[in-house]
Amino acid sequence: MRHEVRFSGFGGQGIILAAVILGRAAVMYDNKYAVQTQVYGPEARGGASMSAVIIDDEPILYPKVATPDIYVIMSQEGFEKYGAAACGEAEMLLDNTLVHSRPACRYIEIPATREARETLGRDIVANIIMLGALVAATGVVSRTSIEKAILDSVPKGTESLNIKAMKRGFELAEVESNR
Amino acid sequence: MSEEEWLRQDRLPHIFCAGCGNGTVINCTLSAVEQIGWKKQDTIFVSGIGCSSRAPGYISTDSLHTTHGRALAFATGIKLANPGLNVVVFTGDGDLAAIGGNHFIHACRRNIDITVVCMNNMIYGMTGGQGSPTTPLGGLSTTTPYGSKEPAFDLCGLASAAGANYVARWTSYHVRELTRSILTGLETPGFSFIESLVQCPTNYGRRNRFKQVTDQIEYFRSHTILVEKAVRMKEKGEEVPADMILSGEFVRRNRPALGVRP
Amino acid sequence: MTRTEFMQGNTACAEGALAAGCRFFGGYPITPSTEIAEHMALRLSKTGGVFIQMEDEIAGIAAVIGASWTGTKAMTATSGPGFSLMMENIGYAIMTETPCVIVNIQRGGPSTGQPTMSAQGDMLQCRFGSHGDYSVIALCPASVQEMFDLTVDAFNLAERFRVPVFLMADEIIGHMRERLIIPDSVVSEQRIPLEPGTLPFKAGEDLVPGFPTFGKGYGVHVTGLTHDERGYPCATSPKLHEDLVKRLVAKVEGARDSITSCDIINPEAETVFISYGAPSRTVQQVLHDHSGDGIGHLRLKMVWPFAESLLARFKNAQTFIVPEQNLGQISREIERHVDGEVISVPKLGGDLHTPDDLYKVLEDAR
C-alpha cells in the first residue's frame, strides 16, 4: 500500500525533520520502503516549507509525490501553498493554532503549537506532537517505530520532552477521532 | 651533496635567457635546501606557469608543474595529505599576484607550512613582456606601451597583512642575504614568503632603460634600502625616496600554522 | 556486518567515498552538493584523513590533485558554477594522469540558474568542458544506494585508469533520502606503483603507466605540458603530442565495453527507453505500471565512455525514447549510433518527468 504524506509549515518548525523521522521509522523499524524529498528555498526561517514522504511495501520507483493521501499542515501559508488543493479521499491533520482555513477533504484539528507551548513549555516540539497525531490517526507507521525514530533523531537531553510530545500527539488524535 | 646534485643534468641547458636572474634565485634556493640538510626524497618543488615556474623541471626531486596561478593550491593538497614532505613553491609576479592572487592570500591566512620563493621580474617574461601587477607605475611593457598607469602590488606587504609567518624581500644582487632568508623560510614552521626582484634583460630591462644586464643589477644594488634603515629614517622625520626598494625581513612570527610535520 | 540506513544521497556519496578509501577532500561549498563536504568534514578527521575547505573550486580540485600525488585517494564535490571553474584543472588531471573523483550534483543552469533544482545539463561539459581532446569516465546514480555504490566504483576506476572520474548525479538523487544498505567492506582498488627503473610516463599494454608516488624517491617531474615518457616537457614535437593524446583517449575508450555498467530490461522490445540518473526512476515506474506492454529500458549507470554496443543489445528496437533533464544532450550521442528513431524528451526547470508524461510519449511513438 503506497502512502504519500506531505508536510508543510514555515521554516524553523521542523517540517523537514518530521518527514525524515517518519521515513526513518518506516525504513529502519517497519521494514518498509520510503523516500523523503523536500522543497529547498533560499530562506532558512519563515516562508513555506514543504517535505514529502512516500511509504510503500514495495521499492519506490517514481520518487516524487503527485497526489498526497495524507497532509500534515502547520501554517496558514503552508496550507495555502501546499494544502488548499487537498480533496477526495485525502486526509489532513492541521495545527489549528496556526491554520485558519479548512480543506475540502476529511481533516483532524490538532492544537499542536498551543499544546507544545502551554502543556510542554516548548514551541519547538509542535512538529513531534503532529507526528504523534499523524501516526495515531493514520497508522502509516507503527507507534513503536515512530518512537524509536524520534529517539534516533532528536538532540541528546531532549528525549523525554520529545517522547512526551509524541504521546500528547497520540492522545490528541484519539480524542479528535472519537468525536 | 652539492647543489649540482639537485639538478637534472639531462635537462640542461635550461630555457632561461642569457643574463636572466632566475638562475641566481634557483641556486640560492638549492643552497638553502642543501644547508638545511633536506633529503631529496622528502622534498617537493611545485610551480605554476611562467619563466620562474620552469625551475622545478630542472630539479631532480619529485616536482609538480601545475596550471597558471594555482601552484599554492596544489601545494596545499600535497602538504596536508603528507605533512612529512618539505614543500617549496617557485612562482613569479604574474603567476602569484595576478591570476593566483586569491590563492596567495588564503595560503598566507592558513599559514600552511610551505616556503614560497617568488622571482619578481615585474613583467610577463615568457609570453614576451606584458605588464604584470608589479610593473612599476610608468613602467613600459607591450601592454603598457605608454607607461603603466596602475600602482604596483607590494607582495611582501600583502603576505604580511594576510598572515604569513615569515616574509622577506631581496634582489638577485643580494645572493648571500637571499640564501639566508630562504634558509630561514625553510626553517620556519608555517607560510614563508621570500620575494626576490630579478632582472629580465630580454623583456623588462631593454624597454626600461637598463641597456645591459648589469645596469639592472646595479640598480638593485643602489636602490635597495633595508627596512630597518627606512624605519629609522622615518622616525627621524627623513623622507625615504619613493623609488627605493625596501629589503630585508618584514615579518618573523609564530602564528598558528597548518600542515606542520607532527 | 552490513547495516541499513535511511540516508540522504549526498551523505551516501560521502560514505561511499570513505568506504572506498578516500582520505582527502578539498572543495568549496555549493548548493546542492554541500552536504557531501559537510559529511566529509565530520567524518574524515575521525578516519585519519584530511578535509580542507579551499578558497574556491579551482583551488579545491587543485588541492585534490596535489593530494593524489602523495598516493592519497582524494575527491571533491560541486555543482554547475563550481564545475565550470574546475575545468582547467580537470584537463591538468587528465594530462598528468592523476587519479581523483569529482562529484557534480547537477542543478539548473546556465549561470547561477536554479541552485536548489535538479538538472542534467552538465553531461556534455563533463565530456568536453576542458580544452583539447580527451576522454572521461562518468557515472550516473539513480538511487541513494547507487550514490554509495557508484562512488566506490568511481574511486576504483580512477585508480585503475589514472583518470579523474566523474559522479554526475542530480539534485533529486543527491537530496532525497531512502534506504541504504552499507556493506561491511567494499572492493577497493589501488593504483599500481611504478616499477623502479621504468620511465614514469611509459605505459604498457593497458596504456596506463605505473604511479610514481611523491616522496618515494622516484624523482618524477609532473607537468601539464606535453611531455615525453620521462615526464619532461616537450611541447613542440607533433608526433609526441599526438601519441600522448591518443594514448590518453585510448586507455579509456579501449576499455569502454569492459567497464560499462547498465541495467537492460526487455531486450526484445521495439520501443526502448534510455535513461540515466533521476529520470530513470520515472521510466522504472512506467515499466512497472505497464509491465505487460513489453517496453524496453536501457538504464545507463556509466554514460561516458559511451558504450554504443549496448544499443545493439536491443535487436528489435525501432524507437528509442530518451528522457533527460536537459535539452537532449545524450539523445544526440545515441542518434549517432542507431538507425531507428530517437525521441528526445527534454525537461527543464527542476521537476522530474512524471510517469504520465512518459507514457504519453510512448503511446504517441507507437
Image (spheres, coloured by chain):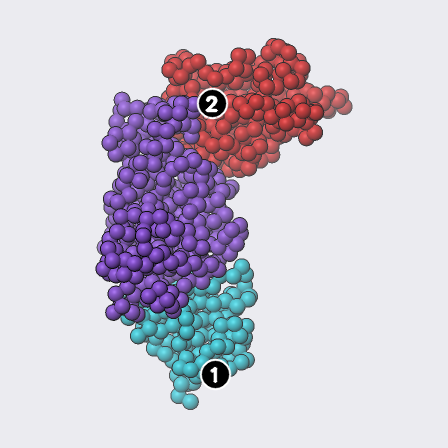
Chain colours: A cyan, B red, C purple
- Which quadrant holds the C terminus of chain C? bottom left
**x, y percent for residue A81:** 52, 72
Residue appearing at x 37%, y 29% in the figure = C242
Q: Are marks 2 and 1 on the same chain?
A: no
In the picture of the structure, the residue carrying the numbered disc 2 is: B54
Please name the amino acid that badge 1 sits on.
Ala
Q: Up-down: is C59 above or below A92?
A: above
Q: Up-down: is C205 above or below A158?
A: above
- Pick out the residue farthest to the bottom: A179
Say left or right for B188 vs C333: right
Res A25 label: none
**x, y percent for residue C302:** 32, 49
Say left or right for C222 vs C113: left
Please name the amino acid that badge 2 sits on.
Arg
Would you identify the image quadrant in which residue B13 lies?
Answer: top left
Would you identify the image quadrant in which residue C21 lies?
Answer: top left
Residue appearing at x 59%, y 19% in the figure = B203
In the picture of the structure, the residue carrying the numbered disc 1 is: A104
Residue appearing at x 51%, y 22% in the figure = B51
Residue appearing at x 38%, y 53% in the figure = C331
Give whichever of B17, C42 is nearer the camera. Answer: B17
**x, y percent for residue C60:** 46, 41
**x, y percent for residue C268:** 23, 60
Q: Chain of mark 1?
A: A
